[in-house]
Each structure stands twice: as C-alpha cells, then as structure tokens.
Amino acid sequence: MAFNVVAKQTENKIPIIAWHGIPAEKSSELFPLMKEAGIPIYLGKYNDITTTLKILDIAQKAGVKLITSCPELKSDVEATVKRLMKHPALYGYYLKDEPETGDLPDLGVWVKQVQSFDKEHPCYINLYPNWAWGKEQYATHVASFIEQVPVPFISFDHYPVALIDSIPILRPEWYRNLEEISVAAQKAKLPFWAFALTSSHYLGPPSPPAFYPVPTLPELRLQVFSNLAYGAQALQYFTFAGAVDKNGKTPVYDLLQTVNREIQNLSGIFLDATVVSVWHTGAHIPEGTQRLEKMPVPQVKALSTTGTGAVVSLLKKGDSQYLVIVNRDYKKTMVLAVNLDKSVKKILKNGTTIPANKSTERIEAGDMLIYTWKILPKNTNNQ
C-alpha cells in the first residue's frame, strides 16, 4: 500500500504535517524552522507546476517533504504526475479539502488517474468534522467516501477547543467523531490521520459562529494524545502560521517542539498498533463513547479517576499490549488510582520503561500515561 511506502520515508516515525501557513516566497526561510519544530512534512498548494517544482527543490534542501498540488495536477494529470513523482521531496498529492458528498465520484476518478501513473505516493483528501457534515449521516458519508475514493488513508479535521458565545468548551461531538473515524478505518483496514489546532481564528457563517483560541500546552496534548489513543497514524497541525508569524516564532512554536518530541519518543508504541477498544471514565462520558464498566484485561485489577475523567485505550502491537490513559480535562490535573499486576510496566515520556509500582498517579491537564505488559500464551489466562 502506498501509505506504507511513504511511512518508511519518515524513518518509521509518526508522520507530522504542517497544514498551510508558509507562503511560497518564505519557504527557504521557514522550512528549516518547521523541521526544527519537529515537523518534517508540509502540505501546501501552489499556483503552477513551475513554482511547485521550485518549492520541492527548497524542501529537499531543507530536509522536509511536501504533500502538494497545483492546477496542472487536475488539468493535465499524466504530465504533471510524471514531473512530480520522481522528486525526492514529494510525499504525496493534495487533491481536496472537505469535499461535499457530490464531489466524491469525480474525486474517485481523479485518484485513480493519479495512481495509474504513480502508485508510490498517496493522494490526500481531508474530510469534514461530523458537526459540519450531517452529524447523524456522518458515518454514512464516511463509508460512501471510502467506497468511492480509493485513497490509502482517511484524514479528517475536528478542532475541539473553542469559544462559543465567549464560553470555552470542548466540542461535545469530538470524541464521537474519533469513534466514527476509528471504526470506519478499522473496518476498511485503512489508517487514519487527525488534526490539532495551532492557529487562532474565527469561524463564521455559514458555519455556526465560534472562536478558536491560541492553544495552550494542555490543549495541544489533549488533541494529539486523544488522536493517538484512538489509533491515529499521522498528526496534522492547522496551520504553521500559528507557530511562526511575520514577527518570528510565536509561543506556540516552543509548545509544538515539546509535544512533537513527546510524540516521536513514543512512536514505537503507536505506529502500526491495533486499537483493541477505547473507553471513557467520569461522571459524564462524551457523546457516542462507551463507559469503562469493568477492567479490560487481567493485568489491570482496578482503575478509577478523579475530575472530568479519562480516555482509556487498549492497544496491541506485536507481543505487547499498552493501556493509554489521557486526562480529558485540559485545565486540571487528574488523579489516577490503579491496582496492577506486577508484570505491568510504566512508559515514561522519553520512551523508557520503569516498574509500575505506584497505586496512584497524577496526570497533568491534557496529558497521558502509558502502561505496558507482554502478551502471554493463552493457557496462562492472559488476553
């Protein structure tokens, strides 16, 4: 599959993508800063094939890759693909953001055209969040997209931290959206890509009005760690302009460096892992999710949380299982109480493993904690 080929180009690390925010004329200056922030891939669209090839050269020199597009990719597919496909800095082809259902047949044809000339680089199409694409019909729309458009992964955007009528909220549909995309991806045997917001902006009509604030470290962590807990295989930031503006690096730049370092230290856990199941704790769990009613595996004898509650995800990779616990509160620390089998280990943010010998842990706002153990043969009564 094309995705696997491209994944190897990122040295078996979680692909991290900056979505727009770098003007073509600023590419030489900003691509190195983007890479320094821990983002090796940029998604950008350019005015013509000549400019696109020039930016690819700049990307190669900076050691980053591009998901890119230009008008000729639509008007002259064969010639354009053949000019782009052999460039070392090409990651993939950007075809469409947030298509309507009526766009899907033509997008399917376009993807097949591109793939007929280049099977190594993926076609990229990004989907609406559920609240903007017929919430109750969302799963049907996603299934229709997968059926009609043969892309090698599913990408969707959903920015959960917002101000609605000046009141800060975590969008109630967000975790339902992660559930829907994760289920659809598993059913189709495709990976999915998800977003975190880095640029403050106002969303106006025809969408319901909302203001997206400048993210804090807990807000960024909550977004990326929840995405990973649900099985995301690539993370995207909208946009790089939130990290570097006309005055230089913003406070968000340092936050991105921190979070991206944490992500890559833990890539070996999440990349190509299988999501066994995801649960939630708390007095009130998010819409469309399932409550943790009983302990999912014998190694976890008891688990409880304070405050808003947590995402609790069970992952499997090779002969290991991982329990990922994300504090859903991006403002307050959560206390986790656990009773664990002595075989369970705790994984630190730097990727090292230590004994899990504490019965209580404090998980900072939006942060996560990971436990792991080896899967034993079935006759040991282990799952």
Image (cartoon, helix red, strand yellow):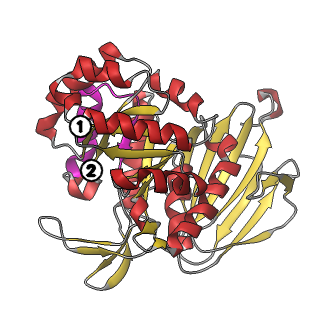
Kindly identify which residue carries mark 1: 48
For residue 50, above or below residue 170: above
Question: Mark 2 or mark 1, which has the lower sequence index?
Answer: 1
Q: Residue 241's spot in the image, x, y percent?
A: 39, 64
In the image as oriented, which residue stretches furthest toward the top? 116
Residue 376: percent from left, percent from top: 81, 33
Which residue is found at the position 42% from the left and 36% from the top?
A: 56
**Predominant secondary structure in magenta?**
helix
- Is 152 a magenta residue? yes
Q: Residue 60 at what x, y percent from top left?
A: 51, 37
Which residue does the image show at 25% across and 84% down from the upper left? 165
Residue positioned 27% across, 33% down in the render? 49
* Depicted 220 relative to depicted 290: above or below: below
Residue 346 in which image quadrant? bottom right
Amino acid type, mark 1: Asp
Q: Which residues are magenta?
A: 136-156
Residue depicted at 25% across the width and 37% down the height: 70
Relative to 347, 32 lies left or right? left
Q: Is 164 one of the magenta-colored residues?
A: no
Closest to the observer: 51 or 203? 51
> Hey, what amino acid is under mark 2?
Tyr
Element under label 1?
loop
Task: Give the camera-side residue of 263 and 74.
Answer: 74
Residue designated by label 2 = 128
Q: Is residue 229 above or below residue 306?
A: above
Q: CA distance from mark 2 to mark 1?
A: 26 Å
Is residue 293 among the parts visible in the rendering? no
Find numbered disc 2 in the image and state the secondary structure of the residue it sits on: loop
